[in-house]
């Protein structure tokens, strides 16, 4: 028995699409029936569509050309797997931070990784600060990684890897810039710096809150809590912290948290009518068992 990736129906004799690698029932086996990415990547001057069920149609006769991100392409792994790419970059950057601090200096570390009110013109830190986290401690990076791991893949499957990438990087930069901007406005002359993917992680949470507010999340794998309650919890914590101690209360970028969450909610509302609403959350936030889709695997859009 296998579950159809389109309608969720259990199927005794499932079909596997040769273009996107997902599993479907008889009703949704054709590419045009499950919004297959192969439809948008097709280049067919002879008007012959290879659905993957007729071996007589060859790549040559169908007019397909080499593609980087398409099925079998050199970079096809990244289609549908940008969540894992971002997680890997977070840990690579984290180890790089510790190496710089150990073998070079804190000044170089701040120049490379910290988006600060002192040097906002260092454009590279707009990006590197998203993946950088508090060094020599697991709490900061682990907290963000957990949210991104469980929820990121689900959002990526809903909006496609391209839009997910833009959402992640765009919100991460906007949250960081907003944090130091608020700090500069409220405390002129005081140094303010920001690190971490919290803004992007909370944007992901915001998107899911709009698209699937009743989605159950099992805290410690035991206690079921709707995702809207988790979002309200984060919003209250940050709001109360700001009221009590400012946008950087407790050494945490509270302003960045709220900015990321608000952007995610707004984006979720913007795409609300264009995507299929998820009803459940599997381990890892993906499509269920099987992990990353790999080259050409999984239901993907880039």
Image: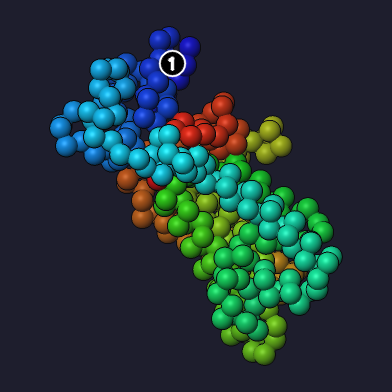
Q: Quadrant of residue 37?
A: top left
Residue under the point 68% across and 33% down = 221
Q: Is residue 183 visible?
A: no
- Please state the horizontal and vertical placement of residue 83, each as a whole percent of the image: 55, 46
Return the residue found at the far front.
Answer: 60
Judge by depth and name the residue closer to the eye, 293 or 253: 293
Up the image or down, 285 lies above or below 209; here it is above
Residue at horizontal 72 percent and vertical 50 percent from the top = 142
| Residue visible at 41% across and 44% down in the picture | 68
Task: Residue 207 in the image: state x and y as whole percent.
Answer: 47, 51
**Secondary element at tag 1:** strand
Front-most of residues 220 and 159: 159
Residue count near mark 1 (Cα–Cα under 10 Å), binned few <14, some 14–19, many ≥20: some
| Quarter of the figure with residue 185 | bottom right
For disc 1, the marked residue is: 10
Residue placed most toward the observer, 196 or 67: 67
Residue lying at the far bottom in this picture: please name it. Answer: 189
Percent position (x, y) of residue 27? Answer: 29, 19
Furthest residue in direction top, as rendered: 12
Quarter of the C terminus within the rendering:
top left
Residue 156 shows in the view? yes
What's the image's color scheme? rainbow
Determine which quarter of the picture holds residue 58: top left
Say if 95 sits above or below 239 in the image: above
Judge left or right: residue 48 versus residue 35. Answer: left
Viewer-proximal residue among 219 and 174? 174
Q: How many marks?
A: 1
Q: Is residue 246 left or right of residue 163?
A: right
Rendered location of residue 189, percent (x, y) = 67, 90
> Residue drawn 83% across and 67% down?
103
Q: Looking at this rendering, what residue extends furthest in the right direction? A: 102
């Amino acid at each position: 028995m296998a579950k159809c990736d389109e309608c969720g129906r259990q199927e005794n004799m499932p079909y596997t699409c040769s273009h996107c690698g997902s599993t479907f029932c008889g009703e949704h086996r054709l590419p045009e029936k499950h919004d297959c990415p192969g439809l948008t990547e097709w280049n067919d001057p002879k008007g012959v569509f290879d659905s993957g069920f007729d071996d007589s149609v060859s790549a040559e006769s169908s007019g397909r050309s080499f593609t980087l991100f398409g099925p079998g392409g050199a970079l096809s792994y990244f289609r549908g797997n940008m969540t894992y790419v971002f997680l890997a970059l977070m840990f690579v950057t984290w180890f790089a931070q510790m190496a710089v601090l150990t073998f070079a200096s804190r000044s170089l570390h701040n120049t490379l990784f910290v988006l600060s009110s002192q040097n906002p013109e260092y454009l590279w830190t707009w990006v590197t600060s998203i993946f950088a986290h508090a060094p020599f401690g697991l709490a900061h990076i682990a907290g963000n990684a957990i949210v991104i791991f469980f929820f990121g893949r689900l959002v990526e499957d809903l909006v496609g890897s391209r839009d997910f990438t833009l959402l992640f990087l765009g919100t991460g930069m906007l949250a960081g810039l907003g944090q130091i901007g608020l700090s500069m406005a409220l405390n002129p002359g005081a140094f303010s710096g920001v690190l971490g993917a919290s803004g992007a992680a909370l944007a992901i949470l915001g998107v899911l809150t709009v698209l699937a507010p009743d989605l159950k999340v099992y805290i410690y794998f035991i206690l079921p809590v709707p995702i809207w309650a988790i979002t309200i919890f984060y919003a209250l914590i940050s709001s109360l912290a700001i009221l009590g101690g400012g946008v950087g209360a407790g050494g945490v970028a509270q302003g960045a948290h709220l900015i990321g969450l608000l952007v995610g909610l707004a984006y979720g509302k913007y795409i609300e009518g264009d995507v299929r609403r998820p009803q459940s959350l599997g381990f890892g936030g993906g499509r269920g068992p099987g992990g990353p889709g790999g080259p050409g695997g999984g239901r993907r859009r880039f």
